Image (spheres, grey):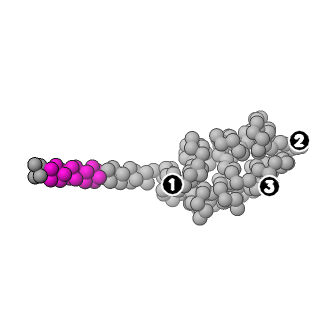
Amino acid sequence: MLHRKTRSALLHQSHQMLLHMRHRKTLSAVLHQSHTNTAAYAPQEDLVCCVTPVTSNAAAYAPQEDLVCCVTPVTSNAAAYAPQEDSVCCVTSVTSNAAAYAPQEDSVCCVTPVTSNAAAYAPQEDLVCCVTPVTSNAAAYAPLEDSVCYVTPVTSNAAAYAPQEDSVCCVTPVTSNAAAYAPQEDSVCCVTPVT
C-alpha cells in the first residue's frame, strides 16, 4: 500500500510538471504573436488608461472598456509610443509629426499636441484627461466612458464644443470664432486652444 501511495504521488507530480510546461509554451507563443503586429499594443500591469489603434490612420484611437491601463508599443514606427517614468499612463511619441503628443505634468494621462494649429490644446490642472480622435480630422473628439473629462463636437465645425452633462469638465465657445474657448470655474478639466 505504501508503494501504491508513493507511485500515485509521483504520477501526480509528473502530471503537474507537464501541465506547467505546456502552459509556458502557450504563454510564450501568445507573447511572440503580440510583438509581430506593428499596430498592436499591450496593456501594462498598472491600472490607468489603455488605448488601441483601430485604423490605419495612426491618429485614430479607441477607448478601452476598462478605464485604466497604459500602453507600450511593440515595434517602432511613427505611431509608436513609449511609456513614461510615472507609473500611470502618459505617453509620448517617439518621432515628430502632427499626431505627436508630449506627456503633461499631471501624474496621470492628459496629452497635448506638440505642433501648433487650431486643434492644439494646452494641458489643464486636472489629473484625468485623455482624449481620442475619432475621424481623420484631428480636431474631432469623442467622449470616453469615464465620467470626468471629455468633450464632444456638436456641429459640423469640429472646433465648436458644447458643455457636457457631467459637472466636472465642460467647455463653451465664447465668441463667434468657434476655436475660442474659455475655461470654466471648476478646477478640473476645461480646455483652451493654444493658437
SS class, disc 3: loop
Q: Amino acid at mark 1?
A: Glu
Please tell me which of labels 3 and 1 falls first in the chain.
1
- Residue segment shown in magenta: 5-22
CA distance separating discs 1 and 2: 46 Å
Give the residue displayed 70% in from the left and 54% down from the top: 127
The stretch drawn in magenta includes residue 13: yes
- Looking at the picture, how far across and down is residue 158, in whole percent? 75, 40
Please tell me which of labels 1 and 2 falls first in the chain.
1
Q: Residue furthest bottom?
A: 85
Q: Give the label on residue 45, or none.
A: 1
- Looking at the picture, how far across and down is residue 113, in whole percent? 70, 55
- Looking at the picture, how far across and down is residue 124, in whole percent? 76, 54
> Is 89 situated left or right of 27 in this image?
right
Q: Give the label on residue 176, or none.
A: 2
SS class, disc 2: loop
- Looking at the picture, how far across and down is residue 1, in whole percent? 10, 49
Circle 3 packing at 10 Å, graded few (<14), some (14-19), many (20+), is some
Asked whether residue 123 is in view, the answer is yes
